[in-house]
Amino acid sequence: MKSRTNTWAAQLEGRSAAEILTWAARQFAPRVALGTGFGAEGCVLVHLIAEEQLPIDVFTLDTGLLFPETYELWRRLETRYNIRIRGVQPALSIGAQAAEYGDALWMHDPDRCCELRKMAPLEGELAGVDAWITAIRRDQTRRRATAAVVEQDQSSDRVKINPLAAWTRDDVWAFIRANDVPYNSLHDHGYPSIGCTPCTTAVAPGEDPRAGRWRGHSKTECGLHLPGAVAPLRLFRPGAKGAA
């Protein structure tokens, strides 16, 4: 599989995002999906999928902790493009999570919170596909700098497709403005990277664009795009045998 993904990556490097998405649909539909967190890049991909009328499923991880502005954008995108973006919820409600793991888990163990509210639901969704499409760009973080247009998911035989890998932030915003793509209004108020409400703050001028994510913690990624990110998770239960 890895040699095949390397061949695909070489063939598709330099192709437009629309061409890469069209290839993904032809190669993998109906077992291909886009998971979007409604960042600016994700909105670009939703636009392209809708404009090209591609048979690509679109879903989002609805953690129950998203900003009101994010939920509003979700509705706007569905209305604008006449598509359905499925909401995937965690097994535990916020209240149930608090009862089992303690109040505000995101404050004292943000990694565990991301496992419960993002990683585990994503694992369930991706179990039913052969390829998943992401909105990552190489210039976002050092970890993402080597992302290929097509690569093998390091925890499975699943293919990971990154149509915007070679795009820059300026490319994204130029496309949004040229095509009047809906985007999160928080971007206009100092939020270049937007996640869950308790773990996202505005960024001051001169700060890294992701400085507002998990501020006060060493954490810089939710874990969705780290090696082995969607391998089966063994979730911690307080008091469970073997719990550290």
Image (spheres, rainbow, N blue to C red):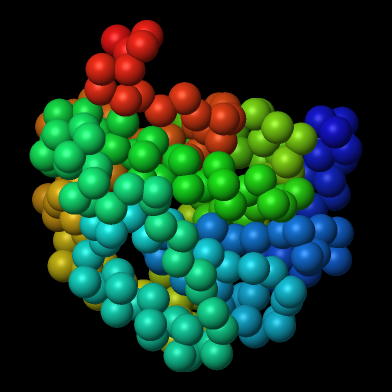
Tell me if 133 is positioned left or right of 15 in this view: left
Q: Image quarter for residue 148? A: top right
Is residue 46 shown to the viewer in this render? yes
Above or below — where is 229 with respect to 18? Answer: above
Quarter the C terminus occupies? top left
Tell me if 104 is positioned left or right of 235 in this view: left
* Residue in the picture at 41% in, 65% down: 38
Horizontal and vertical percent position of residue 181: 45, 81
Horizontal and vertical percent position of residue 179: 50, 85
Tell me if 228 is positioned left or right of 13 in this view: left
Q: Image quarter for residue 45? A: bottom right
* Residue in the picture at 17% in, 61% down: 190
Q: Image quarter for residue 207? A: top left
Is residue 205 shown to the viewer in this render? no
Tell me if 147 is positioned left or right of 14 in this view: left
* Residue in the picture at 17% in, 41% down: 98
Above or below — where is 191 with respect to 91? Answer: below
Quarter the N terminus occupies? top right
